Amino acid sequence: MCGLAGFIPSSKIVKSESNDIIHSMIQTLEHRGPDAADAWVDENHRMVMGFRRLAIQDLTRTGNQPMHSPSKRFTIVFNGEIYNHFELRKELEIKLDKINCWRGSSDTETILAAFEIWGIRSTLDRLHGMFAIAVYDKKLNTLTLARDRIGEKPLYYGIVNKSFVFASELKAIKKFPNFRNILHRPSIAKYLQYNFVPAPLSIYEGIYKVNPGSTLTIKVFPDSFQSLEQEQYWDIGDIAKKPDDRQTEDHILRNLEQSLSGVINNQMISDVPLGAFLSGGVDSSLIVSLMQAHSIQPIKTFTVGFEENSFDESEQAKSVAKYLKTDHTEVILGSKEAQDVIPLLPKIYDEPFADSSQIPTFLISKVAKQHVTVALSGDGGDEIFGGYNRYLWAPSIWNNIKKTPSWLRPTLSTLVRSIPRSSLPILQNFINLTQTQAGGIESLEGKITKLSRVMSSSSQKDFYNSLISHWPDQKILVKGLQENDLYFTGAEYRNFPENCNFSKDFITNMMKVDSMHYLPNDILCKLDRASMANSLETRAPFLDHKIIELAWELPPSLKINNGEGKQALRKILYQYVPKELIERPKTGFSIPIAQWLRGPLREWADSLLSKSRIDADGYLFSEPIQLIWNQHLSGRYDWSDRLWGVLMFQSWLDSN
């Protein structure tokens, strides 16, 4: 995997400065590409590009970037992997000189040849893989930025001191001369709502993320640019369609297994050592099973376990690895090793990010990097195949709520919030759930506050937004917000939950919005930054767009059935691994943040959450934060999700 950066220089930047500037920018991305670095300044000084390379395919210099097409029309910097590029080469060779058309075997060279023959837009439709691309068309004087369909690879852009700047990470953009972009307060609000800054926003004013499945085209002029044209070339919301009920279950599962097996086989192509993350759950176990079926050697698998038994899945992973006969590496960590990662997080993520599983994701990437350069993961299985626990219990709760008169719901919400422990069984009966059905809930008491919020919902969309929001009312938390600051409309904000269309099927709606919103902004951001901080490339076979399209065609019974999700994946997996090795309560890839904040992290948290510190920073109101901090310390409430968001913001401020 790699890191890219570049800019369209304004008249303030003279050509003699550009080489130093771009090298300064890409130096910040060395972790993304430790193997090589290079830069290119257009002879007319209209475009500057730089690149850091992590060599995966074609380890020779012929794979280095920036790379020019044979005609010199296109110049590209490209971060990602195109898994079908050898197939594309065969198509292209019909129109090219077979003897002299290729200098090396990199997918970057394939993309450039495709641009020459098919054009940029048509090429993107043909690519199977993950990518962030910046390509300069010398003939048309245009710069095109493109991001893969689901958002596996990051790409930022914006205006800095009148120059158009782009990069894989914000740290490179911040190296551009005279970067003074201020924090964007509506983005702070959205961050505290979701614990991540959703695309296309970034934490800074004037800096944005390219949306997944989108292109951005800029017309380049001497010393200037204009015409930012955005296009959505693929949208997961458009492919959600009714299942094809004409096929038998056996035929559907066989087709899915063959397709997934083919994708995994393609993603195992590498000129460097390759392995896989293994938690022992459905998703990672299926990926490893199919990998092992394609390999004559034991696949290298990696698991990080924790000393806290309730958060440790290493024994299950070890059992699956032993059955599949993989070359398994297991590392058991204590709380200190995990807590030592916390000071690194602001630099790793560049902008506030508060999914606490960022810590174990970093640690497993660090362990894997000691043995391999590429690791496959099971990410995406929950969103695409119906694995989250909320898909099981949210419809049941909503069916009870909608029977309650709307005028009575706020009152019930208040009552639920104050319910005593002795009355928890009554609450359990109301929502018609058991602890097992809720799956992974530490205690029903810990979810009372969230339930109290959703109980006042007026619609499915309102319910879902309440369910996924950590701080439901950002106006009482973020200083300086204007009346309309929290309203984002337009095509570029179609992925925001409040802007998504909800149909009658609640579960389908949640899966679709999770795939468009939570998956790219949280799960894939976490995976990319944590792995790239360790110079490890990760690949997620479930996120191949053909697999996603197949998943949307599955009948509901092959997603969720009898209170259990991911039915299709389970049925395929049990052909490779005994059911009893997999069937167990899911703990998730988590760590005991709630307990740590009351224990070893308390002093650190106290300093960041103090009234004087928050008031001095000037971004947040301290009163609501102090209230929930004291409630959390009492042990009566678990506010760790909200507190972790504030702590990561405060910690990020310290590092910037």
Image (spheres, rainbow, N blue to C red):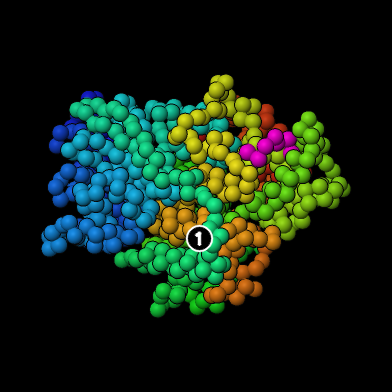
Position above or below: 637 against 104: above
Q: Which residue occupies 66% across, 61% down?
A: 561
Q: Which residue occupies 70% across, 34% down?
A: 458
Q: Label 1, secondary structure: give it.
A: loop
Read off the residue under disc 1. 378
Magenta residue check for 550: no
Q: Which residue occupies 35% across, 40% down?
A: 215
Q: Is residue 319 visible?
A: no
Q: Is residue 263 visible?
A: yes
Task: Please tell me which residue lies in front, 408 or 181.
Answer: 408
Position in image of residue 600 (x %, y %): 64, 49
Position in image of residue 86 (x %, y %): 28, 62
Task: Please tell me which residue lies in front, 619 or 192.
Answer: 192
Category of crowding for the residue at label 1, using alpha-carbon neighbours closer than 10 angstroms: few (below 14), some (14–19), many (at least 20): many
Instruction: Give the magenta part as a residue range.
Output: 455-461
> Which three-letter amino acid code belongs to the residue tagged 1?
Gly
How many marks the image carries: the answer is 1
Position above or below: 178 against 544: above
Position above or below: 195 against 546: above
Left or right: 515 as drawn, with respect to 224: right
